Amino acid sequence: MQPGCPQQAVGKRTALLAAIAVGVLAAAVRLPGAFTNSLWQDEVVSANIVLEPTPIAMLRHVARTESSPPAWYGIAWSGHELGISVEALRLLSVLAGALLAGLVVLWGRRLMPLWGSVLAGVLVALGSQLVTHGSELRAYELYALVSLLFAMALDRFAASPTLATAAILTGSVVVGTLTHYFFLLFAVAGLAWLALSPHLRPVRARASVAIAVGLLPFLVWMPVLKHQYERERFSWIGSFDLRTVLAANWQLFAGSWPHTEALKNLLALVFLGGVVAGAVVLARHGGRARLCGLCAIVPFAGGASIWLAGAPLFAVRNLLGVGAFAALALAALVSRLPRIPALGGGFAVLALAAVGVVDAAEHGPPAFDRAAQELVAQGLRRDDPIVLYGEFFEFRGPLRWYLHEPRLTLAERTRQRCARLFVVSDRRKPSERFLEGRLASASDMAGKILVARIERPPPLADPVWRGGRLLVLLSARTGCVHAVPERSVLASLPNARL
Protein backbone atom coordinates (compact mmCIF):
# COMPACT_ATOMS: atom_id res chain seq x y z
CA MET A 1 0.00 0.00 0.00
CA GLN A 2 1.45 3.34 -1.04
CA PRO A 3 1.33 6.37 1.25
CA GLY A 4 -1.66 8.54 0.52
CA CYS A 5 -3.74 5.74 -1.05
CA PRO A 6 -7.49 5.65 -0.27
CA GLN A 7 -7.24 2.55 1.97
CA GLN A 8 -4.64 4.23 4.18
CA ALA A 9 -6.72 7.41 4.40
CA VAL A 10 -9.76 5.36 5.45
CA GLY A 11 -7.63 3.61 8.10
CA LYS A 12 -6.46 6.91 9.54
CA ARG A 13 -9.99 8.28 9.52
CA THR A 14 -11.28 5.19 11.32
CA ALA A 15 -8.53 5.48 13.94
CA LEU A 16 -9.28 9.16 14.46
CA LEU A 17 -13.00 8.49 14.90
CA ALA A 18 -12.22 5.68 17.34
CA ALA A 19 -9.91 7.98 19.32
CA ILE A 20 -12.58 10.70 19.46
CA ALA A 21 -15.18 8.18 20.63
CA VAL A 22 -12.90 6.87 23.39
CA GLY A 23 -12.03 10.43 24.42
CA VAL A 24 -15.72 11.33 24.65
CA LEU A 25 -16.30 8.20 26.75
CA ALA A 26 -13.50 9.26 29.10
CA ALA A 27 -14.95 12.74 29.48
CA ALA A 28 -18.46 11.36 30.02
CA VAL A 29 -17.44 9.22 33.01
CA ARG A 30 -15.36 12.01 34.58
CA LEU A 31 -17.82 14.89 34.25
CA PRO A 32 -20.35 13.72 36.89
CA GLY A 33 -17.68 13.64 39.60
CA ALA A 34 -16.26 16.97 38.49
CA PHE A 35 -19.66 18.63 38.88
CA THR A 36 -21.14 16.80 41.88
CA ASN A 37 -18.34 15.67 44.21
CA SER A 38 -17.42 18.00 47.04
CA LEU A 39 -13.85 19.21 47.29
CA TRP A 40 -11.86 16.91 49.55
CA GLN A 41 -8.81 17.68 51.69
CA ASP A 42 -6.12 17.96 48.98
CA GLU A 43 -8.46 19.74 46.57
CA VAL A 44 -9.17 22.40 49.18
CA VAL A 45 -5.43 23.00 49.37
CA SER A 46 -5.36 23.38 45.57
CA ALA A 47 -8.30 25.78 45.74
CA ASN A 48 -6.56 27.97 48.30
CA ILE A 49 -3.44 28.06 46.13
CA VAL A 50 -5.50 29.06 43.09
CA LEU A 51 -7.01 31.94 45.09
CA GLU A 52 -3.63 33.53 45.83
CA PRO A 53 -3.51 37.12 44.52
CA THR A 54 -0.19 36.96 42.63
CA PRO A 55 1.99 34.36 40.87
CA ILE A 56 4.71 34.80 43.51
CA ALA A 57 2.22 34.18 46.31
CA MET A 58 0.98 31.12 44.44
CA LEU A 59 4.52 29.71 44.12
CA ARG A 60 5.25 30.38 47.78
CA HIS A 61 2.05 28.59 48.77
CA VAL A 62 3.03 25.55 46.67
CA ALA A 63 6.46 25.51 48.29
CA ARG A 64 4.96 25.80 51.77
CA THR A 65 2.12 23.26 51.66
CA GLU A 66 2.65 20.90 48.72
CA SER A 67 4.94 17.99 47.87
CA SER A 68 4.77 18.59 44.12
CA PRO A 69 6.11 21.13 41.59
CA PRO A 70 4.15 24.20 40.45
CA ALA A 71 3.20 23.81 36.76
CA TRP A 72 -0.36 22.56 37.23
CA TYR A 73 -1.03 25.19 39.90
CA GLY A 74 0.23 27.86 37.53
CA ILE A 75 -2.16 26.68 34.83
CA ALA A 76 -5.09 26.53 37.26
CA TRP A 77 -4.20 29.92 38.75
CA SER A 78 -4.13 31.45 35.26
CA GLY A 79 -7.52 29.90 34.47
CA HIS A 80 -9.00 31.38 37.62
CA GLU A 81 -7.55 34.79 36.77
CA LEU A 82 -9.36 34.52 33.42
CA GLY A 83 -12.66 34.10 35.25
CA ILE A 84 -13.04 30.33 35.63
CA SER A 85 -14.49 29.36 39.00
CA VAL A 86 -12.47 27.17 41.35
CA GLU A 87 -14.84 24.21 40.99
CA ALA A 88 -14.94 24.55 37.19
CA LEU A 89 -11.15 24.24 37.10
CA ARG A 90 -11.71 20.52 37.63
CA LEU A 91 -12.49 20.49 33.92
CA LEU A 92 -8.72 20.72 33.33
CA SER A 93 -8.45 17.18 34.66
CA VAL A 94 -11.49 16.05 32.65
CA LEU A 95 -9.89 17.44 29.49
CA ALA A 96 -6.55 15.82 30.31
CA GLY A 97 -8.26 12.46 30.85
CA ALA A 98 -10.16 12.68 27.57
CA LEU A 99 -7.00 13.58 25.64
CA LEU A 100 -5.07 10.81 27.36
CA ALA A 101 -7.58 8.12 26.41
CA GLY A 102 -7.85 9.35 22.82
CA LEU A 103 -4.08 9.60 22.35
CA VAL A 104 -3.65 6.06 23.69
CA VAL A 105 -5.77 4.90 20.75
CA LEU A 106 -3.82 6.94 18.20
CA TRP A 107 -0.33 6.06 19.45
CA GLY A 108 -1.30 2.48 20.23
CA ARG A 109 -2.41 2.01 16.63
CA ARG A 110 1.28 2.18 15.71
CA LEU A 111 2.05 -0.69 18.08
CA MET A 112 -0.83 -3.12 17.49
CA PRO A 113 -4.08 -3.57 15.54
CA LEU A 114 -6.63 -0.79 15.94
CA TRP A 115 -8.95 -2.95 18.03
CA GLY A 116 -6.10 -3.51 20.50
CA SER A 117 -5.36 0.19 20.83
CA VAL A 118 -9.08 0.89 21.30
CA LEU A 119 -9.11 -1.74 24.05
CA ALA A 120 -6.22 0.06 25.77
CA GLY A 121 -7.96 3.40 25.33
CA VAL A 122 -11.17 2.10 26.91
CA LEU A 123 -9.18 0.74 29.86
CA VAL A 124 -7.62 4.17 30.36
CA ALA A 125 -10.98 5.88 29.90
CA LEU A 126 -12.68 3.75 32.57
CA GLY A 127 -9.85 2.82 34.96
CA SER A 128 -10.77 3.51 38.58
CA GLN A 129 -7.91 5.78 39.65
CA LEU A 130 -7.77 7.49 36.27
CA VAL A 131 -11.47 8.35 36.53
CA THR A 132 -11.18 9.44 40.15
CA HIS A 133 -8.25 11.77 39.59
CA GLY A 134 -9.66 12.81 36.23
CA SER A 135 -12.43 14.70 38.01
CA GLU A 136 -10.30 16.36 40.69
CA LEU A 137 -8.74 19.76 41.26
CA ARG A 138 -5.30 18.16 41.29
CA ALA A 139 -2.34 17.63 38.96
CA TYR A 140 -2.43 13.84 38.56
CA GLU A 141 -4.35 13.53 35.29
CA LEU A 142 -2.19 16.20 33.66
CA TYR A 143 0.87 14.26 34.84
CA ALA A 144 -0.49 11.10 33.19
CA LEU A 145 -1.16 12.99 29.95
CA VAL A 146 2.26 14.65 29.83
CA SER A 147 3.96 11.30 30.47
CA LEU A 148 2.34 9.91 27.32
CA LEU A 149 3.05 13.10 25.37
CA PHE A 150 6.72 12.80 26.33
CA ALA A 151 6.91 9.27 24.91
CA MET A 152 5.15 10.38 21.74
CA ALA A 153 7.45 13.40 21.40
CA LEU A 154 10.56 11.26 21.89
CA ASP A 155 9.27 8.75 19.34
CA ARG A 156 8.58 11.58 16.90
CA PHE A 157 12.01 13.12 17.39
CA ALA A 158 13.68 9.75 16.81
CA ALA A 159 11.83 9.44 13.49
CA SER A 160 12.34 13.07 12.43
CA PRO A 161 15.10 14.89 14.38
CA THR A 162 14.30 18.48 13.46
CA LEU A 163 14.45 21.68 15.48
CA ALA A 164 10.67 21.65 15.81
CA THR A 165 10.49 18.08 17.14
CA ALA A 166 13.38 18.83 19.50
CA ALA A 167 11.50 21.84 20.86
CA ILE A 168 8.39 19.71 21.41
CA LEU A 169 10.45 17.07 23.22
CA THR A 170 12.11 19.68 25.40
CA GLY A 171 8.76 21.30 26.16
CA SER A 172 7.26 17.98 27.26
CA VAL A 173 10.15 17.49 29.69
CA VAL A 174 9.75 21.02 31.07
CA VAL A 175 6.03 20.57 31.69
CA GLY A 176 6.40 17.01 32.97
CA THR A 177 9.14 17.66 35.52
CA LEU A 178 7.31 20.73 36.79
CA THR A 179 4.00 18.84 37.07
CA HIS A 180 4.99 15.74 39.05
CA TYR A 181 8.33 14.53 40.40
CA PHE A 182 7.68 10.95 39.26
CA PHE A 183 7.89 12.21 35.68
CA LEU A 184 11.67 12.02 36.12
CA LEU A 185 11.32 8.23 36.00
CA PHE A 186 9.76 8.51 32.54
CA ALA A 187 12.74 10.60 31.46
CA VAL A 188 14.95 7.76 32.71
CA ALA A 189 12.87 5.30 30.68
CA GLY A 190 13.31 7.49 27.61
CA LEU A 191 17.07 7.69 28.08
CA ALA A 192 17.18 3.91 28.58
CA TRP A 193 15.34 3.48 25.28
CA LEU A 194 17.88 5.66 23.52
CA ALA A 195 20.75 3.68 25.06
CA LEU A 196 19.28 0.22 24.35
CA SER A 197 18.25 0.83 20.74
CA PRO A 198 21.18 0.54 18.29
CA HIS A 199 19.18 2.03 15.44
CA LEU A 200 18.87 5.27 17.43
CA ARG A 201 22.61 5.88 17.61
CA PRO A 202 22.48 8.73 15.01
CA VAL A 203 19.96 10.69 17.11
CA ARG A 204 20.94 9.54 20.61
CA ALA A 205 23.10 12.54 21.50
CA ARG A 206 20.66 15.13 20.14
CA ALA A 207 17.70 13.54 21.89
CA SER A 208 19.64 13.40 25.16
CA VAL A 209 20.53 17.08 24.82
CA ALA A 210 16.87 17.98 24.18
CA ILE A 211 15.87 16.10 27.34
CA ALA A 212 18.70 17.69 29.34
CA VAL A 213 17.68 21.19 28.26
CA GLY A 214 14.13 20.41 29.38
CA LEU A 215 15.47 19.60 32.85
CA LEU A 216 16.94 23.09 33.38
CA PRO A 217 13.78 24.72 34.84
CA PHE A 218 13.47 21.76 37.20
CA LEU A 219 17.03 22.35 38.42
CA VAL A 220 16.01 25.90 39.31
CA TRP A 221 13.14 24.46 41.36
CA MET A 222 15.29 21.85 43.13
CA PRO A 223 15.99 23.89 46.30
CA VAL A 224 12.22 24.02 46.82
CA LEU A 225 12.03 20.25 46.26
CA LYS A 226 14.57 19.79 49.05
CA HIS A 227 12.46 21.97 51.35
CA GLN A 228 9.30 20.03 50.45
CA TYR A 229 10.97 16.68 51.05
CA GLU A 230 12.20 17.74 54.48
CA ARG A 231 8.63 18.59 55.53
CA GLU A 232 7.71 14.89 55.07
CA ARG A 233 4.14 15.47 53.90
CA PHE A 234 4.21 11.98 52.39
CA SER A 235 5.00 10.19 55.66
CA TRP A 236 1.44 8.75 55.65
CA ILE A 237 2.64 6.24 53.02
CA GLY A 238 4.65 4.41 55.67
CA SER A 239 7.29 1.71 55.38
CA PHE A 240 7.89 -0.45 52.32
CA ASP A 241 5.18 -3.05 51.75
CA LEU A 242 5.65 -5.61 48.98
CA ARG A 243 1.94 -6.42 48.73
CA THR A 244 1.16 -2.76 48.07
CA VAL A 245 3.71 -2.73 45.25
CA LEU A 246 2.40 -5.93 43.68
CA ALA A 247 -1.19 -4.68 43.88
CA ALA A 248 -0.56 -1.18 42.50
CA ASN A 249 -1.32 -1.91 38.84
CA TRP A 250 -4.56 -3.69 39.72
CA GLN A 251 -5.66 -0.82 41.94
CA LEU A 252 -4.85 1.65 39.19
CA PHE A 253 -7.57 0.19 36.99
CA ALA A 254 -9.96 -1.88 39.13
CA GLY A 255 -9.79 -0.05 42.44
CA SER A 256 -11.87 -2.52 44.44
CA TRP A 257 -10.90 -5.97 45.66
CA PRO A 258 -12.66 -9.31 46.20
CA HIS A 259 -13.27 -10.15 49.85
CA THR A 260 -11.14 -13.31 49.79
CA GLU A 261 -7.52 -12.52 50.62
CA ALA A 262 -6.14 -15.37 48.52
CA LEU A 263 -8.14 -14.27 45.46
CA LYS A 264 -7.03 -10.68 46.04
CA ASN A 265 -3.36 -11.68 46.00
CA LEU A 266 -3.89 -13.92 42.97
CA LEU A 267 -5.57 -11.17 40.95
CA ALA A 268 -2.82 -8.70 41.81
CA LEU A 269 -0.11 -11.11 40.69
CA VAL A 270 -1.93 -12.18 37.52
CA PHE A 271 -2.61 -8.59 36.52
CA LEU A 272 0.96 -7.47 37.19
CA GLY A 273 2.20 -10.53 35.32
CA GLY A 274 0.06 -9.55 32.34
CA VAL A 275 1.46 -6.02 32.32
CA VAL A 276 5.05 -7.28 32.58
CA ALA A 277 4.49 -9.92 29.89
CA GLY A 278 2.97 -7.32 27.59
CA ALA A 279 5.88 -4.96 28.25
CA VAL A 280 8.32 -7.75 27.38
CA VAL A 281 6.42 -8.45 24.16
CA LEU A 282 6.65 -4.77 23.27
CA ALA A 283 10.32 -4.50 24.24
CA ARG A 284 11.26 -7.49 22.08
CA HIS A 285 9.49 -5.91 19.15
CA GLY A 286 11.90 -2.95 19.25
CA GLY A 287 11.39 0.63 18.10
CA ARG A 288 8.60 2.66 19.68
CA ALA A 289 7.11 -0.55 21.07
CA ARG A 290 10.20 -0.95 23.25
CA LEU A 291 9.78 2.64 24.46
CA CYS A 292 6.21 1.84 25.48
CA GLY A 293 7.31 -1.30 27.31
CA LEU A 294 10.02 0.57 29.19
CA CYS A 295 7.57 3.30 30.22
CA ALA A 296 5.26 0.61 31.61
CA ILE A 297 8.00 -0.96 33.77
CA VAL A 298 10.79 1.53 34.58
CA PRO A 299 8.71 4.14 36.50
CA PHE A 300 6.88 1.39 38.38
CA ALA A 301 10.07 -0.47 39.31
CA GLY A 302 11.88 2.81 40.00
CA GLY A 303 9.16 4.03 42.35
CA ALA A 304 9.18 0.71 44.23
CA SER A 305 12.98 0.81 44.49
CA ILE A 306 12.91 4.34 45.89
CA TRP A 307 10.41 3.21 48.51
CA LEU A 308 12.52 0.15 49.35
CA ALA A 309 15.52 2.47 49.77
CA GLY A 310 13.65 4.35 52.49
CA ALA A 311 11.81 7.23 50.78
CA PRO A 312 8.04 6.71 51.26
CA LEU A 313 6.93 8.07 47.87
CA PHE A 314 5.21 5.03 46.36
CA ALA A 315 1.46 5.55 46.06
CA VAL A 316 -1.00 4.48 43.38
CA ARG A 317 -1.80 8.06 42.41
CA ASN A 318 1.92 8.75 41.89
CA LEU A 319 1.91 5.91 39.34
CA LEU A 320 -0.92 7.40 37.30
CA GLY A 321 1.54 8.18 34.52
CA VAL A 322 2.16 4.45 34.12
CA GLY A 323 -1.53 3.85 33.40
CA ALA A 324 -1.49 4.49 29.65
CA PHE A 325 1.58 2.33 29.09
CA ALA A 326 0.33 -0.50 31.31
CA ALA A 327 -2.95 -0.51 29.37
CA LEU A 328 -1.06 -0.61 26.07
CA ALA A 329 1.11 -3.45 27.37
CA LEU A 330 -1.96 -5.48 28.33
CA ALA A 331 -3.62 -4.78 25.00
CA ALA A 332 -0.42 -5.72 23.14
CA LEU A 333 -0.33 -9.05 24.96
CA VAL A 334 -4.00 -9.76 24.20
CA SER A 335 -3.68 -8.73 20.55
CA ARG A 336 -0.87 -11.24 19.99
CA LEU A 337 -2.88 -14.19 21.29
CA PRO A 338 -4.74 -16.59 18.97
CA ARG A 339 -8.23 -15.47 18.05
CA ILE A 340 -10.28 -17.28 20.72
CA PRO A 341 -7.95 -16.50 23.67
CA ALA A 342 -7.64 -12.93 22.40
CA LEU A 343 -11.42 -12.61 22.42
CA GLY A 344 -11.54 -13.89 26.00
CA GLY A 345 -8.71 -11.59 27.03
CA GLY A 346 -10.43 -8.62 25.44
CA PHE A 347 -13.66 -9.30 27.33
CA ALA A 348 -11.67 -9.69 30.56
CA VAL A 349 -10.06 -6.28 30.03
CA LEU A 350 -13.45 -4.70 29.29
CA ALA A 351 -14.88 -6.30 32.44
CA LEU A 352 -11.98 -4.87 34.41
CA ALA A 353 -12.67 -1.44 32.94
CA ALA A 354 -16.33 -1.73 33.95
CA VAL A 355 -15.33 -2.65 37.50
CA GLY A 356 -13.03 0.36 37.56
CA VAL A 357 -15.61 2.94 36.56
CA VAL A 358 -18.17 1.51 39.01
CA ASP A 359 -15.58 1.60 41.79
CA ALA A 360 -14.75 5.23 41.02
CA ALA A 361 -18.44 6.15 41.14
CA GLU A 362 -19.00 4.37 44.47
CA HIS A 363 -15.94 5.71 46.29
CA GLY A 364 -16.17 9.44 45.85
CA PRO A 365 -15.31 11.83 48.68
CA PRO A 366 -17.76 12.34 51.57
CA ALA A 367 -20.36 15.05 51.05
CA PHE A 368 -18.51 17.77 52.94
CA ASP A 369 -20.53 20.47 51.18
CA ARG A 370 -23.83 18.97 52.32
CA ALA A 371 -22.49 18.48 55.84
CA ALA A 372 -21.58 22.17 56.02
CA GLN A 373 -25.00 23.14 54.68
CA GLU A 374 -26.64 20.95 57.32
CA LEU A 375 -24.58 22.54 60.10
CA VAL A 376 -25.75 25.97 58.98
CA ALA A 377 -29.35 24.78 58.60
CA GLN A 378 -29.30 23.44 62.16
CA GLY A 379 -28.15 26.81 63.46
CA LEU A 380 -24.37 26.60 63.83
CA ARG A 381 -23.04 29.82 65.38
CA ARG A 382 -19.50 31.15 65.45
CA ASP A 383 -19.06 30.19 69.12
CA ASP A 384 -20.40 26.62 68.83
CA PRO A 385 -17.88 23.80 69.25
CA ILE A 386 -18.03 20.75 66.99
CA VAL A 387 -17.25 17.22 68.14
CA LEU A 388 -15.70 15.41 65.18
CA TYR A 389 -15.64 11.65 64.76
CA GLY A 390 -13.33 11.22 61.81
CA GLU A 391 -9.85 12.10 60.59
CA PHE A 392 -9.00 15.64 61.66
CA PHE A 393 -7.25 16.85 58.51
CA GLU A 394 -9.68 15.02 56.21
CA PHE A 395 -12.54 17.07 57.65
CA ARG A 396 -10.99 20.36 58.72
CA GLY A 397 -10.00 21.68 55.29
CA PRO A 398 -13.33 20.92 53.55
CA LEU A 399 -15.38 22.24 56.49
CA ARG A 400 -13.30 25.42 56.48
CA TRP A 401 -13.96 25.79 52.76
CA TYR A 402 -17.70 25.16 52.76
CA LEU A 403 -18.40 27.02 56.01
CA HIS A 404 -16.28 29.94 54.73
CA GLU A 405 -14.41 29.83 58.04
CA PRO A 406 -10.64 29.60 57.41
CA ARG A 407 -9.96 29.83 61.15
CA LEU A 408 -11.74 26.59 62.11
CA THR A 409 -9.19 24.54 64.04
CA LEU A 410 -8.48 22.03 66.79
CA ALA A 411 -9.76 22.77 70.30
CA GLU A 412 -9.31 21.40 73.80
CA ARG A 413 -11.96 21.10 76.50
CA THR A 414 -12.11 23.10 79.71
CA ARG A 415 -13.93 22.29 82.93
CA GLN A 416 -16.91 24.42 81.92
CA ARG A 417 -19.95 22.67 80.44
CA CYS A 418 -21.11 23.54 76.91
CA ALA A 419 -24.64 24.89 76.49
CA ARG A 420 -24.81 23.14 73.13
CA LEU A 421 -22.54 21.61 70.56
CA PHE A 422 -22.65 19.97 67.16
CA VAL A 423 -21.56 16.50 66.13
CA VAL A 424 -20.06 15.63 62.76
CA SER A 425 -19.37 11.95 62.21
CA ASP A 426 -17.95 9.85 59.43
CA ARG A 427 -20.28 6.88 59.76
CA ARG A 428 -17.45 4.48 59.03
CA LYS A 429 -16.09 5.30 62.49
CA PRO A 430 -16.77 3.30 65.71
CA SER A 431 -18.82 6.22 67.08
CA GLU A 432 -21.75 5.17 64.89
CA ARG A 433 -23.41 3.09 67.65
CA PHE A 434 -23.28 5.94 70.14
CA LEU A 435 -24.58 8.46 67.63
CA GLU A 436 -27.43 6.28 66.41
CA GLY A 437 -28.40 5.30 69.93
CA ARG A 438 -28.52 8.78 71.44
CA LEU A 439 -28.84 11.32 68.65
CA ALA A 440 -31.15 9.77 66.09
CA SER A 441 -33.97 12.25 66.66
CA ALA A 442 -31.69 15.24 66.26
CA SER A 443 -29.50 13.98 63.44
CA ASP A 444 -29.63 14.23 59.71
CA MET A 445 -27.49 12.43 57.16
CA ALA A 446 -25.41 14.46 54.73
CA GLY A 447 -24.12 11.88 52.28
CA LYS A 448 -21.81 9.64 54.29
CA ILE A 449 -21.63 12.13 57.16
CA LEU A 450 -23.95 12.41 60.16
CA VAL A 451 -24.62 15.92 61.48
CA ALA A 452 -26.41 16.65 64.75
CA ARG A 453 -27.07 19.54 67.14
CA ILE A 454 -27.05 18.62 70.82
CA GLU A 455 -28.66 20.92 73.37
CA ARG A 456 -27.42 20.69 76.98
CA PRO A 457 -24.97 17.90 76.13
CA PRO A 458 -23.16 15.78 78.72
CA PRO A 459 -19.84 17.26 79.92
CA LEU A 460 -17.03 16.82 77.40
CA ALA A 461 -15.18 14.72 79.97
CA ASP A 462 -18.03 12.19 79.91
CA PRO A 463 -17.05 8.82 78.35
CA VAL A 464 -19.90 9.12 75.83
CA TRP A 465 -17.71 11.52 73.82
CA ARG A 466 -14.74 9.14 73.78
CA GLY A 467 -12.95 9.07 70.44
CA GLY A 468 -14.08 12.50 69.25
CA ARG A 469 -12.00 15.59 68.57
CA LEU A 470 -13.07 19.17 69.15
CA LEU A 471 -13.18 21.86 66.46
CA VAL A 472 -13.84 25.54 67.07
CA LEU A 473 -13.12 28.91 65.48
CA LEU A 474 -9.99 30.65 66.70
CA SER A 475 -12.16 33.69 67.44
CA ALA A 476 -14.86 31.74 69.31
CA ARG A 477 -16.00 33.17 72.64
CA THR A 478 -17.01 30.09 74.60
CA GLY A 479 -15.78 28.95 77.96
CA CYS A 480 -16.20 25.20 77.47
CA VAL A 481 -13.37 24.84 74.92
CA HIS A 482 -10.34 26.83 73.84
CA ALA A 483 -8.69 26.84 70.42
CA VAL A 484 -5.26 25.30 69.92
CA PRO A 485 -2.84 27.72 68.19
CA GLU A 486 -2.19 26.67 64.60
CA ARG A 487 1.52 26.16 65.22
CA SER A 488 0.67 23.64 67.96
CA VAL A 489 -1.97 21.58 66.14
CA LEU A 490 0.34 18.78 64.97
CA ALA A 491 1.90 18.41 68.41
CA SER A 492 -1.52 18.40 70.09
CA LEU A 493 -3.30 15.94 67.79
CA PRO A 494 -2.07 12.68 69.41
CA ASN A 495 -3.59 13.73 72.74
CA ALA A 496 -6.67 15.52 71.41
CA ARG A 497 -9.10 12.58 71.57
CA LEU A 498 -11.92 13.08 74.07
Image (cartoon, rainbow, N blue to C red):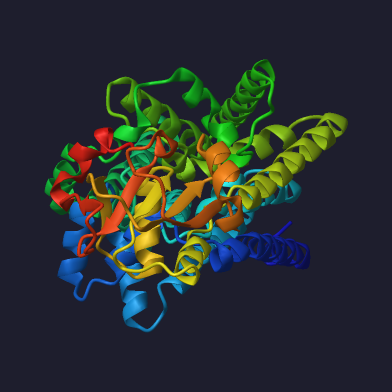
* Above or below 299: residue 81: below
- Residue 16 seen anywhere in this rendered image of the structure: yes
> Which of the 4 quarters of the picture holds residue 309?
top left
Residue at the far bottom in the pictured view:
83
Residue at the image point whose x is 59% and y is 44% from the top:
436
Residue in the image at 69% along x and 48% along y: 358
Residue 160: % across, % down: 43, 56
Task: Residue 117: tell me if it is visible.
Answer: no
Q: Is residue 313 above or below residue 424?
A: above
Q: Quadrant of the N terminus?
A: bottom right
Q: Which one is nearer the viewer's eye here, 213 or 334?
A: 334
Depth order, front residue of 399/419 = 419
Residue 90: image x %, image y %? 47, 66
Which residue lies at the image location 43% right of the left edge and 43% below the top edge? 390
In this picture, residue 495 sits left or right of residue 19? left
Image coordinates for residue 52, horizontal then vertical, percent:
23, 71
- Give the left or right position of residue 117, taking residue 167 as reference: right
